[in-house]
Amino acid sequence: MSVKTVYLLAILLSMTAIMAATFIPDTERSDTTLTRIETAAAPIRKDSVASVKAFASVYKVLMSPRCMNCHPSGDIPLQGDDNHLHTMAPRRGSDGKGLYAMKCANCHQPTNSPGLHTPPGNPDWHLPPATMRMVFQGRTPHQLAKQLVDPKQNGNKTMEKLLEHADDGLVLAGWNPGEGRSLPPLSHDEFKKAWTTWIKTGAYAPLNGKLLQH
């Protein structure tokens, strides 16, 4: 048998093996292969009941003073556990960091100021910008859920970016509000778990007992 013939037979055998492997039934494939395919094809497992239940916890946190005070319906931030208009009436401004000489950073330093009810701090303290106001105040659970997953209303965030947002610096600041202020109704770990569950089970929005998928 010539060398050329041997090479041709080797190529044919290789092609036969590849074709056979392609048509192996799923039940005969390895668990590793199934897990890899399953993970790639279905990163979100839709479950409307679990999703809406998780959003109920998310909503409680987002409507608490630590979140809603910086997501007002108007251009003046809210203040205190009773959500009253901010003293001195600072304005949002186009970039959300204040208007003219009254900038957020004038009072809100990189860290919390010491003392009872003194200004809380963060290096990036601001309201959402005028072009993307992200209002929480007055939103129903359905309205807020739909808003949060709409890139035109959430700061152009994808689902992946929304998941990451749970650990944003200003989000975390809600659990370090300074002396004399109440904390959100859930711990940050509990909030992040509910936030992740809501998104990864389909980001469903509750409405009058019905479930609407975004």
Image (cartoon, grey):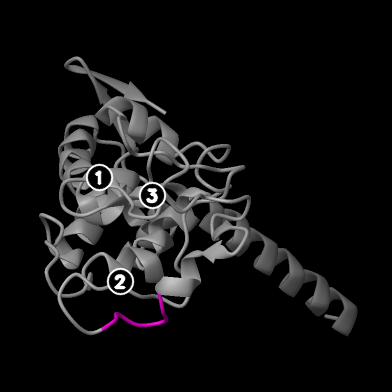
Q: How many marks?
A: 3
Q: Residues within 10 Å of mark 2 (few under 14, many from 20)?
A: some
Prevailing secondary structure class for the magenta stretch in the rendered image: loop
The answer to which of marks 3 and 1 sits earlier in the sequence is 3
Q: Residue furthest front?
A: 88
Q: Are marks 2 and 1 in contact (CB under 8 Å)?
A: no
Q: Is residue 136 among what the camera can see?
A: yes
Q: Secondary structure at mark 1?
A: strand
Above or below, comparing residue 73 to residue 84 in the picture:
above
Q: Residue at x 20, y 65 (%)?
A: 188
The kind of residue tagged 2 is: Pro
Left or right of 64? Residue 40 is right
Q: Quadrant of the C terminus?
A: top left
| Picture disc at residue 119 | 2
Q: Residues within 10 Å of mark 1 (few under 14, many from 20)?
A: few
Residue at numbered disc 1: 84
Query: Which residue is tagged 3?
Result: 77
Q: Residue at x 53, y 65 (%)?
A: 103
The span from disc 2 to disc 3 (Cα, nearest Å) is 13 Å
Q: Going by the image, does 49 lie left or right of 160?
A: left
The kind of residue tagged 1 is His
Q: Position of residue 127 (x, y in %)?
A: 46, 54
Residue drawn at the location 31% of the way across and 37% of the way down: 46
Question: Between 123 and 27, which is closer to the camera in this rendering?
Answer: 123
Q: Rounded to the nearest whole Å, what is the CA distance between mark 2 and mark 1?
A: 15 Å
Q: Position of residue 115 (x, y in %)?
A: 18, 81
Residue type highlighted by circle 3: Pro
* Front in this rendered view, residue 40 or 115: 115
Residue 175 is inside the magenta segment: no
Magenta segment: 108-113
